[in-house]
Amino acid sequence: MKVRSLKLRESHKSAANGNGSFCSILWDLQAHHLVTASSSETTISVHDPLLTSNSPKILRHHRDGVTALALSPNSTCLASGSIDHSVKLYKFPGGEFQSNITRFTLPIRVLAFNKSGSLLAAAGDDEGIKLINTIDGSIARVLKGHKGPVTGLDFDPNNEYLASIDSIGTVIFWEHQSGRVLHTLKGIAPDIGSDVSVMNVLSWSPEGETLAVRV
């Protein structure tokens, strides 16, 4: 396997107060675009990784730092969440703004599409997880059970379950169609307290038999 490195043109600044900022980065399905954001910047940047000399496309719709990004499975829809409590949808890769699909009472920390792209899970510092219909922007269900900010979300590949993790290290398995809690596992990951520059995260394996958790 050949390995090469690319330096993208700088598009995000560090936090003005000198503290660390949380950065998000993701590829589209065909690896034609790279999307980046920072909790210290209100913008989202869409890069062309093959033409790194080109300026990235900049999306300017949030009023505060961008803390979460997610792309639908077919890479036609981009979702973003922010410290400004909002979740927004865009067409991708064009970046045309579609809608504000929900607001929270506190900052957003994580977003995840289900495997069909019909649902977007959104969560953050106010502990509840909202399941949003991407077709009409309606709230399908609100999942409550965490006692700390939710920092990680992932739907299983079979589209039956949602796994979530919070800042105190608790993992919850949900049956997302009914909203029922299947399992609650405490102390699985570190208690990261109020440090918003790091997050407990998790991810399902491709066959859906194993869940990996950052510890």
Image: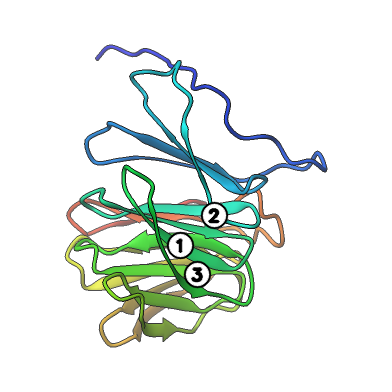
Say left or right for 24 vs 4.
Answer: right
At horizontal 49% and vertical 60% (from top left) the residue drawn is: 110
Q: Residue type at mark 1?
A: Lys
Circle 3: is it few (<14), some (14-19), or many (20+) Cα within 10 Å? many
Amino acid type, label 3: Ala
Q: Give the spatial CA distance, label 3 vs label 2.
A: 19 Å
Whole-percent x, y for residue 68 in the image = 50, 54
Residue topped by disc 3: 123
- In-image side of 17 versus 82 (left or right): right
The reply to whether callout 2 and callout 1 are in contact (CB within 8 Å) is yes
Q: Label 1 to label 3, Cα distance in Å?
A: 13 Å
- Name the secondary structure under disc 1: strand
- Does 116 appear above or below 32? below
- Closer to the camera, 104 or 213? 104
Which badge, 2 or 1, is on the more N-terminal residue?
2
Q: Secondary structure at mark 2?
A: loop
Residue 88, numbered circle? 1
Mark 2 and mark 1: span between their CA atoms?
8 Å
Regarding residue 152, the answer to whether it shows in the image is no
In this rendered view, identify the residue nearer to me: 4 or 81.
81
Q: Which residue is mark 2?
A: 61
Tag of residue 171: none
